[in-house]
């Protein structure tokens, strides 16, 4: 009985959690979505998560015995080696919660936890826009700006196995203040939150309204241009630090306005004398709405996942 | 007959080449230094290099049979996988020269070529300021600005195995033009060459003269302050891209004026909310003048060197 490998992918965000039955070709057989509501405490949420896994398995007509494992992508910080979540701002009530051990025990399969951006880059590498590019950089341009780096298929990890938050690359000395501790980082100018905040002064409701108005309204146009310029500058720095073969641009804003941001990113590549012509390319993220759960499941399928401990 | 492992370390710069007999504790038993003069062509230089290796072996009273290998650190770009040198600006006459194969054949030992910054970080990791820090970043602040990154003992490599030149991180949009293709990169403001050039307008002969005058001359002070500020900004970006446990500051200027640059680097660390307190530290490079040859030899002693091919 030969069959494609099967995994459960869990994508945990501050607001919603998604659970899906995903096979080793990246195909989603069944999925569900529910409120995370982490404030209820971890054990309540874990019980609910187990029920949703059972439900998805049933809908996909998969037996637990057929599972290769459970992959979890979670809004960071997380500790992949210990399988624990440490995000009191986005996931209050779960601090220091070990999500890997109880899932392993309940379903008797391997389980692996990663920061959601790390899960997404593994997903894009296995099933999306990242195939065989090395090193690979993923940029998620949405409400915030984040990303991840894969070198030889291994997730780049910082001190203590922590995930680097390169949305806080410095781009404009005189820019807005950011919670990261400085002014003028990339996220403080180009994120959805930053665009929305800058637009607020001119009566725009949110970043979507600023993007919509930009073709006609000079204030909106200026805000968007600043976001594009900041992204170009941050790209210069990504090129000269990680020297990637490919930068995948994802996230809500990055995907919806891909060409607007990709064009100046490509101009940066063409300007540098430090990278051979044609060595680095900009691609659009391909996994779309399923990126979270497919990325999470890909942690189980990834060939190099055994050596992933920091 | 138990003995400490032995290697030859070769450090090739645009002007000088150094050859040394180095043991696996990092101790230099004998060394020599000669003009690189790459314009004479590679085969002439190779013959000379072989003679210097023989001479150093004789002086150290080592037999060729006792060697574990020959490590070569070379002013980049180099191709470590192919063992070839590709630096027509600094090493004209050697372009595409394979240095590994003839040395392997002549001495019947393993040989390994790396970019000099990559050799230096392996040296600091094995014998200097980098011990057990992970990830480790080396910054070489000298005539130019360069560096290297080690993650889990593996050299961080960019596309095609190339070495990222993070001296070109963007720090000041309105800064001086750089050969890298942009304005206001770190190197264009804080390198010895940049300090010397800025000082030239005020009659200073070179960067050394600017540093010497800075305590009394406001123009010199301003140039040095700009270099320090640029280094602080670049440090912010290094922290949020590579998230290192330790940054080693080396290079002529970095070592001579260590505290001047380390202080604002440490201030950046203390300002960020994205790295746990105390997780990242700034250290001074420890290998000093011997960094080149000891770094080169360390490529042979490094435990993980078998898996180093890009």
Image (cartoon, coloured by chain):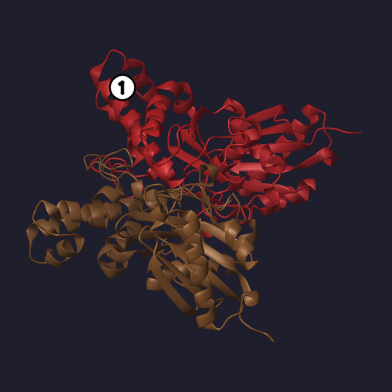
Chain colours: A red, B brown
Front-lying residue, B245 or A153: A153
Front-lying residue, B105 or A130: B105
* Quadrant of residue A185 within the rendered picture: top left
Compared to residue B200, the image places residue B55 above or below, namely below
Compared to residue B148, the image places residue A168 above or below, namely above
Q: How many marks?
A: 1
Front-lying residue, A77 or A124: A124
Please report the residue visible at 74 percent of the width from the left and 34 percent of the height from the top.
A24
Please report the residue visible at 78 percent of the width from the left and 47 percent of the height from the top.
A109
Residue pointed to by mark 1: A204
Q: Position of residue B288 (x, y in %)?
A: 38, 72
- Locate residue A36 relative to residue A191 in the image: left or right: right
- Locate residue A304 relative to residue A1 in the image: left or right: left
- Locate residue B108 relative to residue A211 in the image: left or right: right
Please report the residue visible at 46 percent of the width from the left and 40 percent of the height from the top.
A146
Residue closest to the far top: A216
Q: Position of residue B162 (x, y in %)?
A: 50, 46
Mark 1 crowd level (few <14, some 14–19, many ≥20, 10 Å Cα): some
Please report the residue visible at 37 percent of the width from the left and 39 percent of the height from the top.
A273
Front-lying residue, B126 or A221: B126
Q: Position of residue A193 (x, y in %)?
A: 37, 33
| Residue A155 visible in this rendered orientation of the protein | yes
């Amino acid at each position: 009985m030969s069959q494609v490998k099967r995994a459960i992918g869990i994508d945990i965000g501050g607001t919603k959690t998604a659970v899906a039955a995903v096979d080793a070709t990246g195909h989603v057989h069944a999925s569900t979505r529910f409120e995370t509501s982490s404030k209820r405490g971890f054990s309540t949420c874990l019980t609910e998560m187990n029920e949703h896994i059972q439900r998805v398995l049933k809908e996909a007509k998969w037996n637990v015995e057929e599972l290769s494992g459970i992959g979890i992508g979670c809004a960071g910080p997380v500790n992949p080696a210990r399988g624990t979540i440490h995000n009191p701002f986005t996931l209050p009530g779960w601090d220091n919660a070990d999500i890997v051990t109880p899932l392993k025990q309940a379903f008797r399969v391997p389980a692996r936890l990663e920061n959601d951006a790390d899960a997404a880059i593994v997903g894009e590498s296995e099933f999306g826009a990242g195939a065989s590019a090395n090193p690979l950089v993923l940029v998620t341009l949405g409400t915030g700006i984040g990303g991840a780096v894969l070198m030889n298929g291994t997730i780049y990890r910082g001190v203590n196995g922590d995930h680097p938050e390169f949305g806080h690359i410095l781009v404009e000395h005189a820019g807005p203040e950011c919670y990261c501790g400085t002014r003028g980082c990339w996220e403080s100018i180009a994120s959805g939150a930053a665009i929305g905040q800058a637009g607020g002064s001119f009566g725009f409701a949110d970043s979507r309204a600023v993007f919509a108005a930009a073709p006609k309204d000079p204030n909106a146009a200026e805000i968007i241009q600043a976001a594009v310029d900041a992204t170009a500058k941050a790209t210069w720095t990504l090129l000269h630090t990680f020297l990637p073969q490919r930068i995948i641009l994802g996230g809500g804003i990055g995907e919806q306005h891909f060409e607007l941001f990709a064009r100046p990113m490509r101009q940066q590549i063409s300007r540098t004398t430090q990278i051979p012509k044609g060595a680095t390319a900009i691609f659009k993220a391909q996994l779309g709405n399923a990126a979270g759960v497919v990325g999470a499941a890909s942690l189980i399928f990834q060939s190099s996942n055994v050596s992933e401990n920091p």
